[in-house]
Image: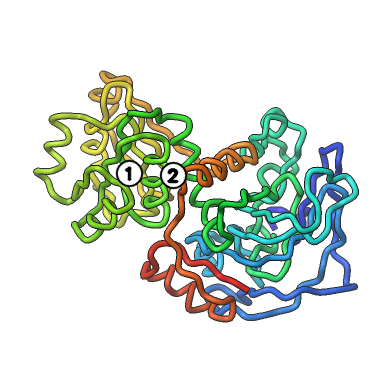
Amino acid sequence: LLYPHLMGCATSSQSSKKSVTKETTMATYKAYGVPSAAAKAELMDIPCPELGAADVEIDVTHCGICHSDVSLADGEWGPFSVFPQICGHEAVGTVAKVGSAVTHLKPGMRVGVGWQRASCMSCQYCKIGEGECCIDKASGCVPTCAGGGKGGFAKKLFVMAEYAIEIPEKLASEDVGPLFCGGITVYKPLAKYAKPGMRVGVVGIGGLGHMAVLFAKAMGCSVTAYSTSKAKEELAKQLGADQYVVSTDEAAMAAGAEDPAIDVMIVTINQTSDPSKDWATYASHLKMKGAMVFVGAVLNPVPITMFGPPILKDLVFAGSHIGGPKEIKEMLQVAADKGVKPMVEVLPFDQINTALDKVRDNSCRFRMVLKW
């Protein structure tokens, strides 16, 4: 196991409020698990862990499906999958029980949990609410459903209370789940690099990309959407995009290079089958001191010659992953205040295999959500 200390519960060896959750055989809860790589999900009984002092028990009502869940279920990430693999890291539910050291959550409160379920709570990053950057060697950023963690495709979820975030009343449970993974993934770099009045380029209008458009507009930016065909143009403009560029149209891409207008470019695509994809042309669309931020899992190298626009225009090339509790709370409030609502398709949990297949074949628009 990558996280032998986890085994389906949140733990922390460093926190002053130590999470000491351990499995017992006194009770079980229902969860949908994948018994082996690429197998169908099955309903199974999972032992309920003993609640640690810093932990919280959640009765799950909804859980979104991220492409990462499919990768884990299909065994694409090697040892990150531990079978039976119980995925789900866009979980929403109500607090059922809290540990003895938990004071900010109470039973009945509505909360959500994203990719991370625990961290050390004592390193320099955890202390300022950026636990996603936890540098403790024993725990680090403990994932909700990888490395043996039992995720949100279940009736219950057990996590460190710090990573169960209260949900504003304005946000509907069936809509908010995807914000805890895809939403925070795009919100974090936008909050860091974009300012009102700037132009944001969004590469890829899918699960991540459509939320990037929504948040960029909510932040007062104009948006240029990039996609490989005209198929999503109408949808992108409905989401709020001001311009739409077909990235396979050489003339359109050349025009963008001749008159650079992008302050911040968020690259949301998860992979590229073309190792020669012309990233240099995308970079040429950036204005002076612009930034290109990768949030999708681009599997091939990104070749860009540094001597040219990157150096001469003081460009920034960066990666960004999930956000910590502080940024997730901020993002949720922005979503509540500005009416940010991801596009979701909701199915009951007993249709989980149909939902997973729709994510596999990219036929959902744009996020699948399961509901008990």
Q: Which of pointers 2 and 1 indicates the residue nearer the eye?
A: 1
Query: Residue at the location (90% across, 49% down)?
Result: 100
Query: Residue at the location (39% across, 54% down)?
Result: 270
Q: What label does residue 295 carry, if any?
A: 2
User: Which residue in the structure is indicated by mark 1?
Assistant: 202
Q: Amino acid at mark 1?
A: Val
In the rendered view, would you say 106 is above or below 81?
above
Res. 49 image quadrant: bottom right
Is tag 2's residue or tag 1's residue first in the polypeptide sequence? 1
Q: Amino acid at mark 2?
A: Val
Q: Residue furthest left?
A: 251
For the residue labelled by badge 1, is the local secondary structure a helix, a strand or a loop?
strand
The residue lying toward the viewer, choosing from 317 and 246, is: 246
The answer to whether residue 260 is left or right of residue 355 is: left
The residue lying toward the viewer, choosing from 95 and 321, is: 95
* x and y percentages locating residue 240 in the rendered image: 31, 47
* x and y percentages locating residue 245 in the rendered image: 20, 46
Res. 299 visible in picture: no
Res. 5 visible in picture: yes
Quarter holding the N terminus?
A: bottom right
Query: Residue at the location (42% across, 60% down)?
Result: 343
The residue lying toward the viewer, choosing from 176 and 50, is: 176
Q: CA distance from mark 2 to mark 1?
A: 11 Å
